[in-house]
Amino acid sequence: MLKEGIIIGDRYEIISRIGSGGMADVYKAKDHKLSRMVAVKVLKAEFRADTTFVSKFQKEAQAAAGLAHPNVVNVYDVGEDRGLYYIVMELVEGITLKDYITKKGKLSVKEATSIAIQVSLGLEAAHNEGIVHRDVKPQNIIISTDGKVKLSDFGIAKAINSNTITANVMGSVHYSAPEQVRGGFSDTKSDIYSLGITMYEMVTGRVPFDGDTTVAIAIKHLQEELIAPSRFTPDLPFSLEQIILKCTQKNPERRYPYIGDLIEDLKKSLVDPQGNFVQLTPLNTSAHTVIASSSDTAAVRKAARKQQSESRQQRMQRTTAQTSSPYHEEEEEEYNRPSRNRDYDDGTDMVSSKLEKAITIGGFLIGAVIIIILIVVIGNMAGLFNRSSSSSDAASASASTSSTAAELEENEEAEADLATVTVPDFSNYTLAEAQETANSYGIGVKQTGTQESSEVEEGRIISQDVAAGDKVEPNATIGVVISSGSNTITVPTSLVGLAQQDAVNALAAAGLGSSVVSEASETVAEGYVISVSPGEGSSVLPGTAVTLTVSSGSATGRVTIPDNLIGVDQASVVNTLSGLGLQVSVAEAYDAAYADGVVTEISPAAGSSVEEGSTVSITVNTAPDPDSYISQAVIQQPAAYTGGDVQLILEQSPVTTTIYSGADPFVNGVYSTTIYGLQGYPYGYLSIYEGDVLLDTILLEFSPQ
């Protein structure tokens, strides 16, 4: 295992290990020459001295280096440094299709079809370059974070025109074509078979052939019929099932001849899910399940035992830890059998003697028809037949030609429609939601930028570079701009009523500026904030200057005594009244209904208009002296009382104390209260006033507490 920070090839700095397989470890690295992140696959130490493994490792690079396609993991570089053999590849952040299937159980039809199309496009690029992948499986298919599907690991790829059958060429046995299992010649149709098995797993969540050993699975590929995927997914469209069945035919000649034909049918299946357009070559009438011969079975088992024996020591050296990286290589036992100079034959193309006779008779009949046609053509040319029919024949031919041209035009239009995808509207989607929706349409979505927005929530799409409703090619990628949210600041609350400088400091702390406007006020003390613009709690840009309207005092020489001063502490009330240009007179009295030290009375009353400089009297609640005398007074309502405001005033010479001032205190004609008197004064006179009218005076007796 390479340590972080090591530089190989004089340019690739190892960052971390992201995957490990049977032959190689994969590292995330930084390419210092091109300033980009890459994936570096390094052959494991136990294989560096083995020329076979080194050759196989280098073959992967040679096979993939010539490919440059959006659906193939690109190879950038290959080299050797201090005995380390490495391949530099495109770094794809994402998840393997195998992990994705495991996570979801089974994929939707549209999602599976989209992935199959993209993998097919990658295979088509490889086949066009003369390369057969030979290890197509979900573990070697990566779904990137932007929804792009990429084919990786050309580790056992070979040239299409190579007829040499070498040992250990079979990929993962669950996905291997019968000709690969038997060690026969494999070509592009082998990749189509493996892709068919992969599609089967995508739509059903399971592989069609499984077993306790890889030998058992290999034999099933040879002799068992594939269970129709609709058995496990009843709502599977007819056309997609037929595509899968055609891809997985045991006889290569009954599969798609070219990957491009498969792509066309996959596109059609999206438009016509229940269409019957997939052409399956019919089986002969005597076809039956093929049983692998004893020699075939023995060859598979012998190859398995041989390879197990040869590689047991190497496998013991390998680590069993596997990571969940997209570059993970699943280890499978590989099998081969000795080369045979014969065509592939799985038994399904054996022709019975009856069929041979039918073919012979059919050949004679076809020959006879051809002879008759030649006689008619020659006769027409020689004028032997009725010429009167020529004009009608010509007209018929013209009409037929016209009809054929119209049909061709309609077919071309239909094919054009099949080859495009209508772009959905991704507005207000999250990137993940948009990618999931796009994948169901067979296209991709990637983020191309961010933009501030006060209307679109942070993390949701503001715009897309291809308008909704426009048509694009399948597998096209739509760029989207994501909202970074509103870059605004909230104007602080509780600014109104603060002193000017305190308000300015609060705005500065919030990252806002301030400007001050003076305004006369009869109710707000001079130098205090009357109002704020924009209002408290408003959202504004950073640095915005908030206007503070500050009181310049009274403009008329008169002041209105503010509301809400009762119950406020003495110091605050004095500051407020003094700020209005008023004098303050303070008296003390005890009232059990208020806390100690707060104002219980104010005169003139709140809301009164007085001249500046006038004196306002306030009464502050003061707890009684613990050494004072007490009287539990029960005061009868005076007969002359008419229901107005009442004042109860205690006189203990030389001190006069207001005991109560306010609305009618009498309940059922009685007012009971505790009255505190002066220490050492056993008596006092309590006067009862209604407004300014004295209603009664009673003598109270006090005693120590």
Image (cartoon, rainbow, N blue to C red):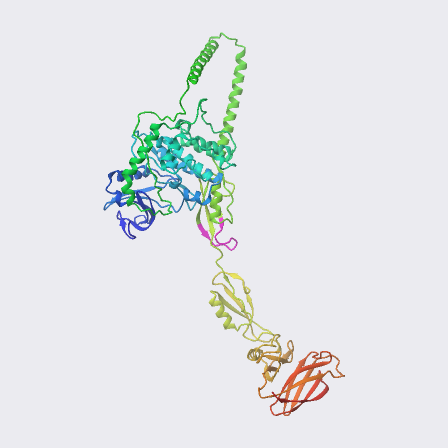
Q: On the rendered structure, is 557 left or right of 469?
A: right
Residue sitting nearer the eye, 245 or 482: 245
Measured from the top left, where is residue 651 in percent x and y?
Answer: 66, 89
Measured from the top left, where is residue 20 in percent x and y?
Answer: 33, 46
Corner quadrant of residue 659: bottom right
Q: Residue at x 54, y 62 (%)?
A: 538
Measured from the top left, where is residue 241 in percent x and y?
Answer: 48, 33
Q: How many marks?
A: 0
Residue sitting nearer the eye, 304 or 448: 304
Q: On the rendered structure, is 171 left or right of 696?
A: left
Q: On the rendered structure, is 76 left or right of 492?
A: left
User: Is residue 43 in sight in this rendering?
Assistant: no
User: Is residue 326 in sight in this rendering?
Assistant: yes
- Chief secondary structure of the magenta portion: loop
Image vertical order of residue 295 relative to residue 137, above or below: above
Split into 4 quadrants, where in the image is the C terminus?
Answer: bottom right
Magenta range is 449-462
Residue sitting nearer the eye, 470 or 204: 204
Is 66 colored magenta in this rendering?
no
Q: Residue furthest right?
A: 639
Measured from the top left, where is residue 457 in percent x and y?
Answer: 51, 54
Corner quadrant of residue 702: bottom right
Q: On the rendered structure, is 503 left or right of 64?
A: right
Q: Residue furthest top?
A: 384
